[in-house]
Image (cartoon, rainbow, N blue to C red):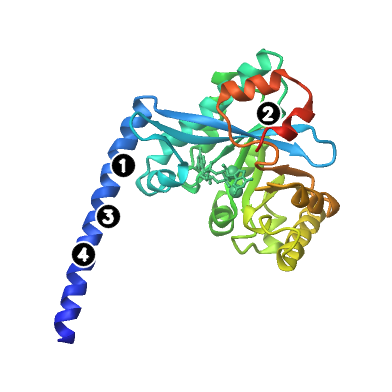
Amino acid sequence: RAKEEGRNTYRFYTEEMTALALEHLELQSRLRHAIEAGQLVLHYQPQMELAGGRMVGLEALVRWEHPEQGLIEPSRFVPVAEDTGLILSLGEWVLRQACCQARAWLDAGLEFGRVSVNVAGKQVQRGDLLAVVQRALADSGLPPDRLELEITESFVMKEAERAIDLLRAIRALGVKLAIDDFGTGYSSLAYLKLLPFDKLKIDKGFVRDLPWDENDAAIARAVIALGHSLQFTVIAEGVENEAQRECLLRDGCDQAQGYLYGPPMAWDRVEALLRREEASVWRVVGL
Ligand code: C2E
Ligand code: MG
Ligand code: MG
């Protein structure tokens, strides 16, 4: 009886795995087609100086404009792209697109600070990231100090040692480097200061329950102090309300990003807001 059940469970399990693998394959080929068919778009989310309220940057976040399903979030296809290597062409497209858009805004006299682009671990591991970045900068004409790359803490801690020369070379171009999702990846503190990064992004998981959750408040305070003692700029992601903003400001956090200031938006909406100039307008965009 137990044996039978075991066998059934096994069969069920393999069927499920096959279905998953097929889904994965199908998604992979649809995504490849989407890149070629120009169905990917970038949305941009403002990054704000906490004390002054000035905009200091825009993070580019990819979306898939599916002809039938509408806008698909990156959590539904970026992991598949990472597993299959498609992330290399997707990542290069994102980088070029963000640089070209930023250059167009500069040409139109619109000030946004820096454009920030997420880079997957695979793109760093492949080793040609320096050339890809140089090409995107040269072809777009974007000054290097207008570009920032975000790399997740989990990748940085696992693999950065091998990539340290590459990261240094990219930074030597004038491009800024940020550690994304900080606090989730078991950083070695001694190691952190050896790495060529400019900015720490406190993961939104630690921001969500501020200021009420005492553990999260203590973690946020500690990360801000740590970041500053290592000369990093510190930004909090996922800032949704005034209470969170006040708490972070009190603890000396430099910058914030989140629905309080504005969600990720299509380029034309961002452009309309940039044209209004007054930084105060960003306060009311979000909700
Ligand atoms: P991330 O880089 O940490 O981006 C922040 C995510 O938080 C974004 O989700 C953003 O929409 C969301 N967010 C912004 N403000 C708030 C807020 O106030 N509250 C909450 N709860 N969430 C907020 P999104 O756009 O779905 O992107 C998810 C992740 O997908 C990103 O996390 C990033 O890791 C990845 N991703 C997005 N675009 C790219 C890309 O072009 N390349 C790569 N490699 N990864 C990307
Ligand atoms: Mg990011
Ligand atoms: Mg993040």
Kind of residue at disc 2: Arg
Residue displayed at 72% across by 65% down: 213
Nearer the observer: mark 2 or 1; the answer is 1
In the displayed image of the protein, which residue is found farthest to the top? 108
Q: Residue 68 location, x and y as percent?
A: 33, 31
Instruction: Assess whether mark 3 and mark 1 are in contact (beta carbons under 8 angstroms).
Output: no
Q: Which residue is mark 3?
A: 20
Depth-wise, is mark 2 or mark 4 nearer the camera?
4
Q: Is mark 1 within 8 Å of ligand 1?
A: no
How far across and down, in percent of the image, does residue 157 sit? 58, 58
Circle on res. 14: 4
Graded by Cα atoms within 10 Å as few (under 14), some (14 to 19) or many (20 or more), the crowding at tag 1 reads some
Secondary structure beneath dot 2 equals helix
Mark 3: amino acid: Leu
Q: Quickly name the residue at label 1.
A: 28
The three-letter code of the residue at mark 4 reads: Thr
Q: Secondary structure at mark 3?
A: helix
Residue at x-position 19% and y-position 79%:
6
